[in-house]
Amino acid sequence: RAIKPSSSDKKMHRLRIHCKKLRYSLEFFASLFPPADIRTVINQLKKLQNNLGAFNDLSVQQEMLHQYLARLRPGSGRNQQLASAIGGLLTSLHHEQQQVREAFFSKFRRFARSENTGLYKKLFG
């Protein structure tokens, strides 16, 4: 299944988990491969994983704030001010998450370059 700009946060998170498992496997078996090659592969994967981690953190933060907003009791002036402030924060977090999402596709294009895919083929057949 392809990751697209419209992919859900959950799908992005699943990709992050798969990248993490792959990276840990590569690190575990690193001694079986030429050091420079395996280091390159792992570093490329780390860049993707870091981006996906930042994306997921922003997703979780937004979800927690939405849950907090749902528990606020309407009517109180203080709660209205708090809801307004949280709304502004949610807007900011969403904007940042969109930037991180866009950066993912740039990082993925670099990850999927022919030099990198060729290195995977060289190492893993």
Image (cartoon, rainbow, N blue to C red):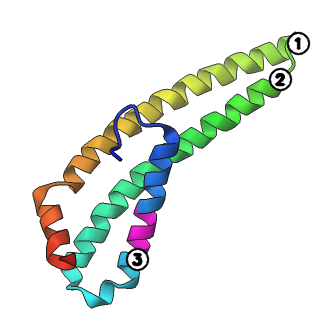
Q: Which numbered marker is on residue 72?
A: 2
Q: Amino acid at mark 3?
A: Ser
Q: Which numbered marker is on residue 25?
A: 3
Q: Secondary structure at mark 1?
A: loop
Residue closest to the eye, 8 or 41: 8
Residue 62 lies left or right of residue 20; in this view the side is right
Residue 100 lies left or right of residue 76; in this view the side is left
Q: Is residue 44 above or below residue 26?
A: above
Asked if the residue at tag 3 contacts the one at tag 1, i.e. Cβ–Cβ closer than 8 Å, the answer is no
Residue closest to the eye, 118 or 101: 118
- The picture places residue 17, in percent across and down from the top left corner, at 48, 59
Residue 122 lies left or right of residue 33; in this view the side is left
- The picture places residue 93, in percent across and down from the top left corner, at 53, 31
Q: Amino acid at mark 2?
A: Leu
Asked if residue 92 can be seen in this view, the reply is yes
Q: Is residue 78 above or below residue 5?
A: above
Q: Amino acid at mark 1?
A: Ser
Q: Which numbered marker is on residue 97?
A: none
> Badge 3 local density, few (<14 within 10 Å), some, or many (20+)?
few
Q: Quadrant of the C terminus?
A: bottom left
